[in-house]
Image (cartoon, rainbow, N blue to C red):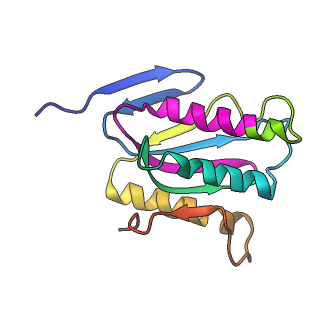
Amino acid sequence: MSPPATHIYRRFLPHWRIDGAVYVVTWRLHQDQVRLSVLERQQVAEMLHRFDGDRYELFAYVVMDDHVHALLQPHDEFPLEGIVHSWKSYSAWLFQRGHRQGRVWQREYYDRIVRSRTDFDEKLRYILDNPYRRWPGIEEYPWAWSRHDAAG
């Protein structure tokens, strides 16, 4: 059995790709943009679910007021960079139909290969705890989600 194929490319940041890998991805609002509204956070959350099971397996996400984290495994025929591009471009298109103008998201995004079950669990916890670290005292945050079977 041969090892999974590895591919590395660079934009501003290096991006490593391994067939069958799980990734944690983060992208941020452009510095000229105001925080995401409640409606926009809901639109991003709904968008993330749109191709879950078809193009990728989505394990968790959080849509914060200025950034998004997602934990996912792309299907072989859908490269991660294409998935992230579609998320960013579709959500920007939606937001620009409303009140936003100009570049919505920062050009680059951060992605990291999840290396083990322990690493997966750490990333999952980080994603789900993100709003509670930022806003201590909140009781619930509707734009954080994980699959019922994602936690080990």
**Viewer-closest of 56 and 106:** 56
* Residue positioned most to the right: 99
Place of residue 54 in the rendered image (x, y in percent of width and height, measured from the top left): 42, 44
Residue drawn 54% across the image and 43% down it: 25
Q: Is residue 4 above or below residue 23?
A: above
Q: Is residue 126 above or below residue 115?
A: below
Q: Measuring 48% from the left and 51% from the top, which residue is drawn there? A: 71
Choose between 95 and 103: the one closer to the eye: 95
Judged left or right of residue 113, residue 14 is right
Can residue 52 be seen in this snapshot? yes
Count the numbered circles shown.
Answer: 0
Q: Position of residue 51 (x, y in %)?
A: 49, 45
Q: Is residue 64 visible?
A: no
Name the spot of residue 139 as percent of width and height, x first.
70, 78
- Magenta range is 66-93
Is 79 a magenta residue? yes
In the picture, measured across the screen, residue 72 lies left or right of residue 135, that is: left
* Residue 39, quarter of the rendered image: bottom right
Quadrant in which the N terminus is drawn: top left
For the point 81% across and 54% down, the residue is: 37
Tell whether 49 sits left or right of 151: right
Q: Which image quarter is the C terminus in?
A: bottom left
Q: Quadrant of residue 27?
A: top right
